[in-house]
């Protein structure tokens, strides 16, 4: 799911844009991309991931996946830019390719922080994007 976030408040000092309201997260990371970098090609079994685009331009490729790791349905390709929020539900494989230098905030509900970062990250047998 892709959501274009709107400005909640603006004055001469700048803007306020709410990413989440009444929805705390268990983990948050800043992730940067050099142009051409590919990140992801994985899914989560227990965690929902939320990605907010801070800057740049990204190609997102996603696809549903069965519990046995088999991809199902069709691949979805979306272009993302500043202020988009993407929600990756459990068993939704995802990969990003930076079309230019980019940065994101990655939030998660569930086991995804610190030393547990990789505990709920399942690499795809066949990448969505190379």
Image (cartoon, rainbow, N blue to C red):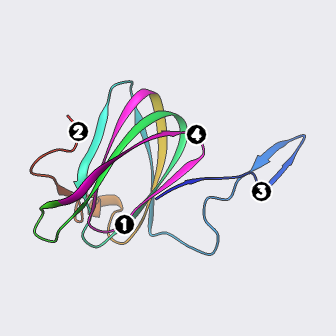
Point out which mark residue 1 bears. none
Residue placed under numbered mark 2 in the picture: 129
User: Rounded to the nearest whole Å, what is the CA distance between mark 2 and mark 3?
Assistant: 35 Å
Any mark on residue 8, and which?
Answer: 3
Residue at screen point 24% across, 65% down: 120
Residue 96 appears left or right of 7: left
Tag in front: 4 or 2: 2
Q: Residue 82 carries which label?
A: 4
Residue pointed to by mark 1: 89
Instruction: Look at 29% across and 35% down and name the residue there.
Output: 38
Horizontal and vertical percent position of residue 34: 38, 26
> Which element type, helix, strand or loop, lies under badge 3?
loop
Instruction: Give the mark, 4 or 3, whose residue is nearer the N terminus.
Output: 3
8 in the magenta segment:
no
Return the disc, 4 or 2, that comes first in the chain's sequence.
4
Which circle's residue, 1 or 2, is located before the other in the chain?
1
Q: In which quarter of the image is residue 55?
A: top right
The stretch in magenta equals: 72-100
Q: In which quarter of the image is residue 112?
A: bottom left
**Counting other residues with Cα less than 10 Å from the Cα at mark 4, is it few (<14), some (14-19), or many (20 or more)?**
some
For the residues marked 1 and 3, what is the alpha-carbon distance in whole angstroms?
26 Å
Alpha-carbon distance for marks 4 and 2? Answer: 22 Å
Q: How crowded is mark 2: few (under 14 residues within 10 Å), some or many (20 or more)?
A: some
Q: Percent position (x, y) of residue 46?
A: 28, 73
Q: Answer above or below: position of 43 versus 58.
A: below
Q: Nearer the viewer, mark 2 or mark 3?
A: 2
- Kindly identify the residue that appears in the image at 21 percent across and 44 percent down: 128
Q: Does the magenta stretch include residue 91?
A: yes
Q: Position of residue 29 (x, y in %)?
A: 44, 52
Provide residue 66's location: percent of width, then percent of height: 17, 68
Mark 2 element type: loop
Per the model, the C-alpha gap separating discs 4 and 3 is 16 Å
């Amino acid at each position: 799911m892709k959501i274009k976030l709107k400005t909640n408040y603006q004055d001469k000092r700048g803007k306020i844009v709410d990413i989440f309201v009444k929805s705390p997260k268990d983990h948050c990371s800043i992730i940067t991309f050099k142009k051409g970098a590919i990140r992801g090609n994985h899914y989560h079994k227990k965690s929902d991931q939320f990605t907010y685009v801070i800057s740049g331009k990204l190609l997102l490729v996603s696809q549903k996946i069965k519990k046995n790791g088999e991809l199902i349905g069709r691949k979805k390709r979306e272009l993302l830019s500043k202020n988009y929020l993407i929600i990756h539900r459990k068993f939704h494989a995802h990969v990003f390719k930076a079309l230019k230098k980019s940065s994101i905030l990655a939030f998660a509900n569930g086991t995804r922080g610190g030393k547990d970062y990789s505990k709920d990250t399942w690499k795809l047998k066949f990448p969505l994007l190379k």
